[in-house]
Image (cartoon, helix red, strand yellow):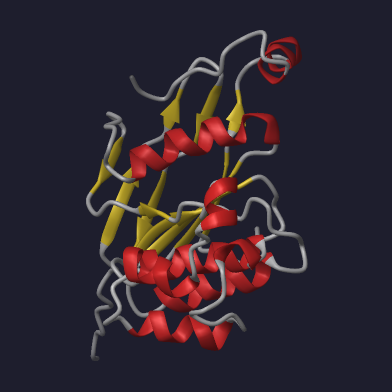
């Protein structure tokens, strides 16, 4: 009898659970090739929760229950000031030159995925195109990413999600921080953030009368 031992994929992040006095994020592991979704049902606290998780997964802030073996780089939204957009708008080519490694094949591949060119201005791209361009820049330097799909309509986010899945299938891993469960059945693991306060407590958090608690100082 021949035993075939399957090598377990490399562990990037191990979380034993993050608990505050208001919410709980269940334990999970992120391994190479996996795409984990962390879901929070209410959007009013989304940016705060997301920014805290991003800093933890990047290794910028330490949490006693989270072991970051390989940090994740967040794909930041591409923003341009109104004045710069009028007088000196940045082109796709200039953005990639500043933010991406041109030697990586993903830089040329983004022009096969989207219809824009290097000469097109960032200000003329839609939210979904900007998101993929940001991801392209990140993927040119690392295959370990965190991202969100905020601002992308239902007709567009699937293209971005597939782009990420394609980039990590050979190596790397990703965490999507999301406020919908549309992709619940199309990920490696689906982690739901659980509120631990009562309805009155939730109301105060959502209307801003009580501050959202921090995961770490």
Residue at horizontal 75 percent and vertical 10 percent from the top:
200
The answer to which image quadrant residue 107 occupies is: bottom left
The answer to which image quadrant residue 66 occupies is: top left
Q: Quadrant of the C terminus?
A: top left
The answer to which image quadrant residue 97 occupies is: bottom left
Q: Quadrant of the N terminus?
A: bottom left
- The answer to whether 50 appears left or right of 158 in the picture is left
| Residue 46 spot, x, y in % from top left | 61, 36
| Residue 58 spot, x, y in % from top left | 31, 45
Give the farthest residue toward the front.
87
Say whether residue 156 is visible: yes
User: In the figure, 116 relative to 39: above or below?
Assistant: below
Residue at horizontal 51 percent and vertical 85 percent from the top:
111
- The one nearer the camera, 108 or 181, is 108
| Residue 56 spot, x, y in % from top left | 34, 38
Say whether residue 42 is visible: no
- The one nearer the camera, 126 or 49, is 126
User: In the figure, 41 relative to 152: above or below?
Assistant: above
- The one nearer the camera, 206 or 38, is 206
Residue at horizontal 49 percent and vertical 54 percent from the top:
147
Disc tally is 0
User: In the figure, 162 relative to 150: above or below?
Assistant: below
- The answer to whether 115 appears left or right of 71 in the picture is right
| Residue 120 spot, x, y in % from top left | 56, 75
- The answer to whether 139 appears left or right of 110 in the picture is left
């Amino acid at each position: 009898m021949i035993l075939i031992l399957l090598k377990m994929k490399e562990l990037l992040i191990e979380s034993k659970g993050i608990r505050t006095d208001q919410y709980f994020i269940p334990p999970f592991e992120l391994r190479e090739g996996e795409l984990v979704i962390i879901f929070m049902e209410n959007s009013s606290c989304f940016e705060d929760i997301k920014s805290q998780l991003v800093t933890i997964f990047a290794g910028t802030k330490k949490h006693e229950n989270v072991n970051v073996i390989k940090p994740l780089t967040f794909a930041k939204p591409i923003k341009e000031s109104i004045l710069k957009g009028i007088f000196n708008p940045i082109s796709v080519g200039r953005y990639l030159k500043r933010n991406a490694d041109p030697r990586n094949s993903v830089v040329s591949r983004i022009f096969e995925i989207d219809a824009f060119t290097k000469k097109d201005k960032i200000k003329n791209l839609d939210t979904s195109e900007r998101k993929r361009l940001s991801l392209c820049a990140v993927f040119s330097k690392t295959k370990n990413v965190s991202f969100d799909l905020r601002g992308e309509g239902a007709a567009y986010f699937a293209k971005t999600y597939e782009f990420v899945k394609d980039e990590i299938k050979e190596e790397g891993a990703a965490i999507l921080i999301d406020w919908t469960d549309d992709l619940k059945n199309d990920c490696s693991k689906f982690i739901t953030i659980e509120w631990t306060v009562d309805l009155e407590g939730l109301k105060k958090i959502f209307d801003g009368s009580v501050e959202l608690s921090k995961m770490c100082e």
